[in-house]
Amino acid sequence: MNPYQSPRETYLAATVSTASPQQLLVMLYERLTLDLQRASEALRNGEPSKAHEPLLHAQEIVLELNASLDVDAWDGASSLAALYDYLHSELVKANIGKNLRVTDFCLDIVSTLRDTWRDAALSLVAKSA
C-alpha cells in the first residue's frame, strides 16, 4: 500500500486485488462502457478533443481483454478474439476521425458484451452459493 494514495485510490486497489476473475472481467467492461459513454457525450457536445483520452483508454482495455483471452479455453474464444480485433480497429477509426456514429456503434457492442459477462458472472455466483 502506498502511503501517498488517496482513500479512493486505496479503495480501488483493494477492490481490484480482492476481486475474482469474473468480477475483474465485469469491472473492465464497465470501465470500457464508461469510457465510450464519455467519448460519445464529448462528441455529441461538439468537444472532440475531450473524446480522445476516453477513446484511447477504451482501446487499451480492448487490447488487454484480447491479450488475456485464452483462445483454447472454449469454442467461442477465437470468435471473441476476432470481435476484439474488430472492435479495436473501430475504436482507432472513431478516435482518428472523432466519429460519433462509430463510437456509438462500439458502445452498443460493448454494452451487450458487458451485460452478457455480468449475467454469466452472476450465474456463477448463484451456482456456488
Image: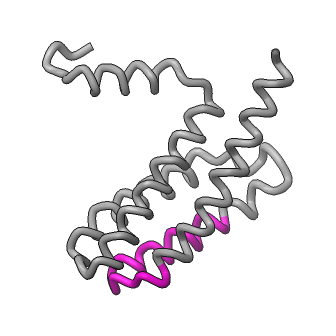
Asked whether, in this view, residue 3 is left or right of residue 124, the answer is left
* The image quarter in which residue 95 lies: bottom left
In the picture shown, does residue 10 fall above or below 40?
Answer: above
The number of discs equals 0
Quadrant of the image for the C terminus? top right
| Residue found at the very far left of the displayed protein | 4
Q: Is residue 96 magenta?
A: yes
Magenta-tinted stretch: 82-102
Q: Position of residue 72 (x, y in %)?
A: 77, 47
Q: Which residue is at a point 50% across and 77% down the rendered structure image?
A: 90
- Nearer to me, 35 or 67: 35
Q: Position of residue 39 (x, y in %)?
A: 36, 68
Asked whether, in this view, residue 64 is left or right of residue 20, the answer is left
- Nearer to me, 68 or 46: 46
Quadrant of the image for the N terminus? top left
In the picture shown, does residue 44 fall above or below 60?
Answer: below
* The image quarter in which residue 83 lies: bottom right
Q: Which residue is at a point 68% across and 51% down the rendered structure image?
A: 115
Q: Position of residue 73 (x, y in %)?
A: 78, 43
Q: Which residue is at a point 28% across and 27% down the rendered structure image?
A: 9
Q: Which residue is at a point 67% across and 60% down the rendered structure image?
A: 112
| Residue found at the very far front of the displayed protein | 45
- What secondary structure predominates along the stretch shown in magenta? helix
- Nearer to me, 83 or 33: 33
